[in-house]
Amino acid sequence: MIALTTLPSAYDGGNLVLRLLPLGYAAIRLTMIFLSPERKPFASVFFMFVYITLGVVPLVQYLLDREQYYSVGVEPITTSLIILVGCGAFDVGYAVHQRRRNKDQGAFPVPSEQSGALVTSGGIVALRLLSSLTLVVALYYISSAGGVGAFFSSRQDLGIATAESLSSDGGEATRAVVASLAKVGPLFCLLAYLFSSRYKRMSIRIPDGFVIALLAIANIIVNNPISNPRYWFLAVLLGVFFTVVRSKTGQDLAIVGGILAAIVIFPVSDVTRYANPQEAIARGSIWETIAVKDFDQYTMINNSISFTNDVGYSLGRQLAGVLLFWVPRSVWPAKPLDSGVVLGEWLAMRNTNLSSPLWTEGWMNFGWAGVIVFLLALGLLGARLDGTYARGLSLPYQAPIGTQVGTALLAGYLFIILRGPLLQASARLLVIIVFIGVLNRILRGSPGDQSSAGRIKR
């Protein structure tokens, strides 16, 4: 509304409505989530992404007549329909799983909180060992980059340092896996300690305090906002927040604050991306900044339409590259590039580090069917995770710690999955899933061990 009343620009009513539709859809859904008594971090982040990147930004870019200069074959009707169909598919998947979950809970009543258990002594020892292993990986990653200083210079310098030391041996896949283990591992273990302490699932002893301190230091180094993409740092912040804050009001305020921060702070927060910070500084109003800085999601959905009109659909080839991201190119020379790079090369762009929203991924693979299936599957998964998360907050003694912590982190990581490209997001996503399974296995409580759970003999 502020943009409409403060931006002097002549515009076509039809095009304006097309850009208002995704914005209005996301605004209505966010309002419904805020009014609901249920905690829905996954759905909240999804519609926050839609509201900002596919709603506010395209509207401002259109009103300022500053749509991305690399937009080809403008298709506002199809682009907006793709966004709306994807949002509708997400909501259908979410509602279907939610209805099935409510039916199952009616048939099988939830047991009382007293049947839960503290983490066993063996589980605490296993968590210490896992934390130590992740710290070793983080130390290797830090040393490979040339030391701690590389993580407080710029993303550009860090990328060059790690490319020289890690990519030379095993290629980009090795580099991505090592970086993902070094960043996700210490974060996951720290969140497991925070959740267990917050909900009294274990007794924190002196050795645990020492491990927690080392994990905190490791996270400050490898996950700081200076040398990391803003989307990943946002995932870290939301992961910590959703792990330790159980208040519905607090979570709603976090989403509102995230929207405001994304519009005001996010566009200029890449000052540390380059060795020369002046390259990242933009001048002008807030609206001018978001119209030209980094928000290319609507444009890339539009470009994918022109791309498939010219080249055709990949019919699952791009998806195969995502699922088999771990296969080195030395073994699979024809391995697909990520969708953002494919579109960038087709556009003959010098900078091919472009986004590829989930809508684009679905469209480039299978057209309308891809958009519906990709977003429908995300809605099913989102409802499952939100349901598990809400139940874990009401019955923290029963919550599988890995699932609870993983859901909090995945809600934040959803921004990266939605922005794409999926190929770039795959390595870290796989590491998160593996850690969920590992933590669930090693931190299982035992009702018969509650009297001594969490007690380590000295």
Image: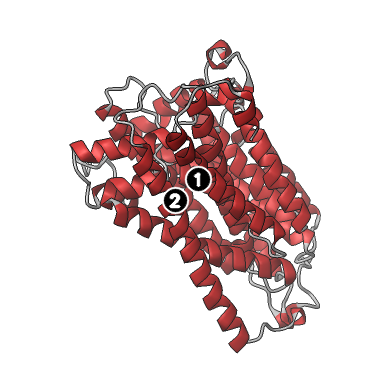
Nearer to me, 251 or 145: 251
Depth check: 431 or 33 in front?
A: 33
Q: Nearer the viewer, residue 388 or 292?
A: 292
Residue 180 spot, x, y in % from top left: 49, 43
Instruction: State the residue at coordinates (75%, 66%).
Output: 201
User: x, y percentage for residue 218?
Assistant: 64, 39
Residue reaching furthest bottom? 107
Q: Residue at x 44, y 50 (%)?
A: 84
Residue type highlighted by circle 1: Pro
Above or below: residue 139 compared with residue 322: above
User: Mark 1 sits on what residue?
Assistant: 22
What residue does disc 2 label? Answer: 84
Q: Are marks 2 and 1 in contact (CB under 8 Å)?
A: yes
Between disc 2 and disc 1, whose residue precedes? 1
Q: Secondary structure at mark 2?
A: helix
- Looking at the picture, tell me which residue is in the foreground, 92 or 77: 77
